[in-house]
Image (cartoon, rainbow, N blue to C red):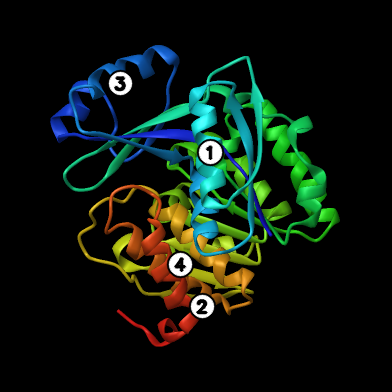
Amino acid sequence: MIYGIGNPLIDIIVNVEEEDLVELGIHKGTMALINSERMEELLLFSKSRTVSHSCGGSCPNTIIALASLAVPVTLAGKIGRDESGQIYRRRLAELGVGDELVECDRDHTGSTVILITPDSERSMNTYLGANRLYAKEDVNVDTVAGARFFHFTGYMWDTDSQQEAIGHALQVAKAHNTTVSFDVADPFAVGRYRHAFLSLIREHCDIVFANREEARILFDNYDPYECCRSMGKLCKIAIVKNGKKGSFISYNGTVVSVPVMGPVIATDTTGAGDVYAAGFLYGQYHNYTVRESGLVASILAGEIITQRGAQFSSEKSAQLRSYLESGSWRTRQR
């Protein structure tokens, strides 16, 4: 089983123009943490636009993608005792995701307004809500101990209680030989917690995901290959995603290149990194080689950017499961 602790968020996806971001004062392509007043402002702006809703959050996206590929998974996090929280729980049940979400009365379920420009870049504005309150006592240590993989992201570092919860889960994972997977998640998060993340990678993590910008900040180096080599010295498997150029994976000190497996022009990049992580963990769960796991990751990321949103339909999931199980993808090159 793959266990994830993350921030369950209701995604509110809005199509916008470049000038809208300027008018709203939003830095394109990043994730900003916002307060309730800013959320109300963005919701008011969104009322005149085309909007869609889905279950979101970086770690949840990864866990949901794995569930769609028939991998047994469980998701933990914190939601409000409200309608959004109940919608989220019902959706997890429909998707076959194990539910260890904890409800609270102190805040609303978190939400993210995702603004997508014509070039398919997404700018995320997140109100964490109840997620901020996830705490050490909310961690189900038996689930962590029994899992083969424990996955979390850098977004869990934005409150002390979340940090303590992850730290507790990491101790349990280490004691029970649970493989730890960490996605650093966002350039701003890396900027805020660079030294903490480097220590975290060195001391606790087996598999680490970063994109080229996150890796650049971590290692003060603009070369994604060299960043992958540097990160590979800190953990068993280090992955640096290099956009349209594919990705680099370091395993036991050797770096391999994995080609991109999707279209040159994306429809929507929302969740591409999360689905890449799901693909790699899918491969590792099935005992594939590191390169094979990287190919699966690239294939799934290439598929998700051809559609709107960060989750596959049930029909698409069935097609992908059949394709991966056939093994024909092993000889595929772009």
As drawn, the label of residue 297 is: 4
Give the residue displayed 46% in from the left and 76% down from the top: 324
Ranked by sequence position, the earlier of labels 2 and 3 is 3
Give the residue displayed 63% in from the left and 36% down from the top: 77
Ranked by sequence position, the earlier of labels 1 and 2 is 1
Quadrant of the image containing the C terminus:
bottom left
Q: Name the front one of labels 2 and 3.
A: 3
Look at label 1 and name its amino acid: Arg
Mark 3, secondary structure of its residue: helix
Q: Which residue is mark 3?
A: 42
In the rendered image, residue 8, in percent from the top left (x then y), is placed at: 53, 36
Q: Are marks 1 and 2 in contact (CB under 8 Å)?
A: no
Look at label 3 and name its amino acid: Leu
Distance between mark 1 and mark 4 Cα atoms? 27 Å
Look at label 4 and name its amino acid: Ala
Q: Which residue is mark 1?
A: 90
Nearest the camera: 332 or 253?
332
Q: Which residue is mark 2?
A: 291
Other residues around mark 3 within 10 Å, as few (<14) / some (14–19) / many (≥20): some
Nearest the camera: 198 or 267?
267
